[in-house]
Amino acid sequence: MSLNETLVKTLRSLCSSLGAETITVSVSGAAHAVQAMVVDRGVCLLDSQVAGYSGERGRLALAYVVSGDLPALPERGDEVAMLGGVWQLRYCKPLGLAGAGLLLLHCVSEERARLR
């Protein structure tokens, strides 16, 4: 079994045993519902790959999805509906060999985070 097959099998197993969330990812103007493992990281300082400007803070969520479940790679600015709201995709990181296997989506809440 290849690394990519192992990654996909492991994610699907986690989704079935822990309970996946169905998220909707807008790719090329069309919405696609996929199963994902989602982690809400809360409000934090965003790193340079995710941030729109230096020192940006926001509510960050990470979603692991199988790359084959989407027709194309999502791009920065695409919308992701999850966790009861709409999030903006800031960074899509392919995981696995040759970019196949899984995608790690870094999303920032569209709602303004209340920061002090």
Image (tube, helix red, strand yellow):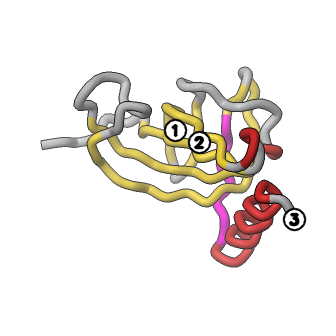
Are discs 2 and 1 less than 8 Å apart at CB? yes
Residue 33 visible, this angle: no
* N-term mark: 1 or 3: 3
Tell me if 50 is positioned left or right of 94 in this view: left
Q: Residue 55's spot in the image, x, y percent? A: 23, 31
The part of the image, by quadrant, that contains residue 19 is bottom right
Residue 46 visible, this angle: yes
| Residue type at numbered disc 2 | Ala
Tell me if 33 is positioned left or right of 112 in this view: right
Q: Which residue does the image show at 71% across and 28% down from the upper left?
A: 27
Q: Main secondary structure of the magenta part?
A: strand
Q: Which mark is residue 115?
A: none
- Asked whether 20 falls inside the magenta stretch, the response is yes
What kind of element bears circle 3?
Answer: loop
Tell me if 39 is positioned left or right of 68 in this view: left
Q: Which mark is residue 86?
A: 1
- Quadrant into which the C terminus falls: top left
Q: Which residues are magenta?
A: 19-25
* N-term mark: 2 or 1: 2
Given this view, does label 2 or label 3 mark the residue nearer the observer?
3
For residue 20, above or below residue 84: below
Q: Residue 42's spot in the image, x, y percent? A: 34, 53
Q: How many marks?
A: 3
| Residue type at numbered disc 1 | Val
Q: Which residue is mark 2?
A: 81
Q: Which mark is residue 1?
A: 3
* CA gap, disc 2 and disc 1: 5 Å
Pointer 3: residues within 10 angstroms few (<14), some, or many (20+)?
few
| Residue type at numbered disc 3 | Met
